[in-house]
């Protein structure tokens, strides 16, 4: 599993931003991302776009995990994110929970928290499931 | 101006993803981002999170540019993005237009297009303006 | 055409809130809604939910108009709306422009303006196109 | 309390669509809405705009309840909603949970469910808190 994860994230945005997948279950995906020079905005805070990218990564991986064995593909179509709290260093953890698993559409809620489990951002991702 | 832009983007997510700001006017900001190993997802396509990050960067820079001289700060609070078309290589250009410039809230529409000006993604960013 | 519109809106939320469709073209739909006791929130202002409902109505009608002759159906899957300006009375006009017309997904931008064409709200609707 | 609720919803969109507030606690608000000729779209299903309107109503009431005693006002600035399941009749129940209660911003997650507690729609509302 870890090998498959490593292969999937090689040479991707996830790698460029230091993301690490730490858990993949049916309907739940967890991953981390550092707050450092790769993920900050000019004021030294975690960039909102990094939060959105982590959220999109986790939900997409989760939908792929649910449908790829059926020969289907998961295509992210909409993501929205609220930025709730600034963070200057350390690590954030993203936790993606599937909210709706339909035949055509998956919806994920993703919370991004700091080391004290305080909410940094919250997101919702809509994924379309298509036959390949 | 270019110097100020370079300084602002040094050691940030924008630099990590290869973003370049190419135009900053009152109410309009334009920037580019490569589609390469820094911005792709595992299937080799532009990562939706990269589009969201470019959109958030452009709108945030635009609001900062509008209010920083008044001693105010721009805080991104919500961003939403539709992913419309895949892209495997080359460069995307993000074009952020201010949609609403209120005293407390700015709203930006951001279109991300390819080299033929075809729409890759479209986003809306809500920024809160606060006294520092 | 007007007859078809009247039939479509009879006994619907659109009728309950006083919406009127005034123009339907390929990729553009326009409609009005009164600001009165049917569409206000408790403070006497236009309810944000009324704006969202008008936006969803216009984009849905627009997608239906584009695909129904091909035996396909339009299903709204996500809508997001920014509320920008309060309004106490009179009429608002919603203008829905198609932003992306794909085989599987339509995306609409909808602006809601007052009598002076000032922006009251702006929305984006994602519609999935399915075979019936 | 019931009296205050009744007074707040009189001559509003909530009344026009048959909404009823059934529980208001700090950080939680619950309300119902019928699926009938007031809330359907032309195909006889619950209108997505009605779901958005119920979600916005519940979160707005919840923020008002949290800050009005401090002389502050709650202004809805952004709402987004995923429509997940059709419904032709009966009643839906909306359940709004506060996700983030900051000094300037509240964020609510709102689930809309049917009589069997199946998810019909899910929404997120961003509220700005201002001094009156």
Image (cartoon, coloured by chain):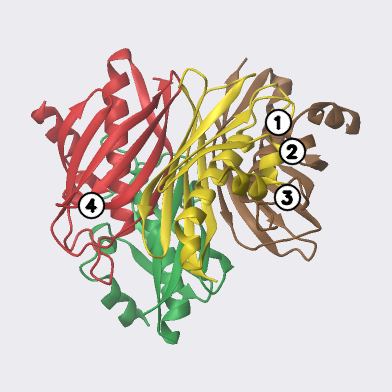
Chain colours: A green, B red, C yellow, D brown
The nearer-to-camera label among 2 and 3 is 3
Residue D25 on image: x %, y %: 78, 40
Q: Are marks 2 and 1 in contact (CB under 8 Å)?
A: yes
B25 or C111, which lies in front?
C111
Separation of marks 4 and 3 at Cα, in angstroms: 39 Å
Separation of marks 2 and 4 at Cα, in angstroms: 47 Å
Q: Residues within 10 Å of mark 2 (few under 14, many from 20)?
A: few
D35 or B50, which lies in front?
D35
Residue C6 on image: x %, y %: 65, 44
Q: Which residue is mark 3?
A: D94
Earlier along the polypeptide chain: callout 2 or callout 1?
Answer: 2
Separation of marks 1 and 4 at Cα, in angstroms: 46 Å
The nearer-to-camera label among 1 and 3 is 3
Where B25 sits versus A31, above or below?
above
Earlier along the polypeptide chain: callout 1 or callout 3?
Answer: 1
Q: Could you tell me which secondary element the residue under label 1 belongs to?
A: helix
The nearer-to-camera label among 4 and 3 is 4
Residue C101 seen in this snapshot: yes
Residue B56 on image: x %, y %: 33, 41
Earlier along the polypeptide chain: callout 2 or callout 3?
Answer: 2
Q: Which residue is mark 4?
A: B118
Q: Which residue is mark 2?
A: D26
Residue A118 seen in this snapshot: no
Q: Residue at x 56, y 27 (%)?
A: C92
Where A35 sits versus B106, above or below?
below
């Amino acid at each position: 599993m870890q090998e498959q994860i490593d292969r999937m994230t090689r040479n991707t945005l996830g790698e460029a931003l230091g993301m690490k997948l730490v858990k993949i279950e049916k309907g739940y995906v967890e991953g981390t991302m550092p707050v450092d020079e790769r993920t900050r905005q000019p004021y030294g805070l975690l960039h909102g776009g990094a939060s959105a990218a982590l959220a999109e990564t986790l939900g997409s991986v989760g939908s792929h995990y649910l449908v790829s064995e059926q020969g289907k593909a998961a295509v992210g179509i909409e993501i929205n994110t609220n930025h709730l709290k600034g963070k200057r260093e350390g690590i954030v953890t993203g936790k993606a929970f599937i909210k709706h698993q339909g035949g055509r559409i998956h919806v994920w809620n993703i919370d991004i928290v700091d080391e004290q489990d305080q909410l940094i951002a919250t997101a919702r991702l809509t994924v379309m499931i298509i036959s390949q």
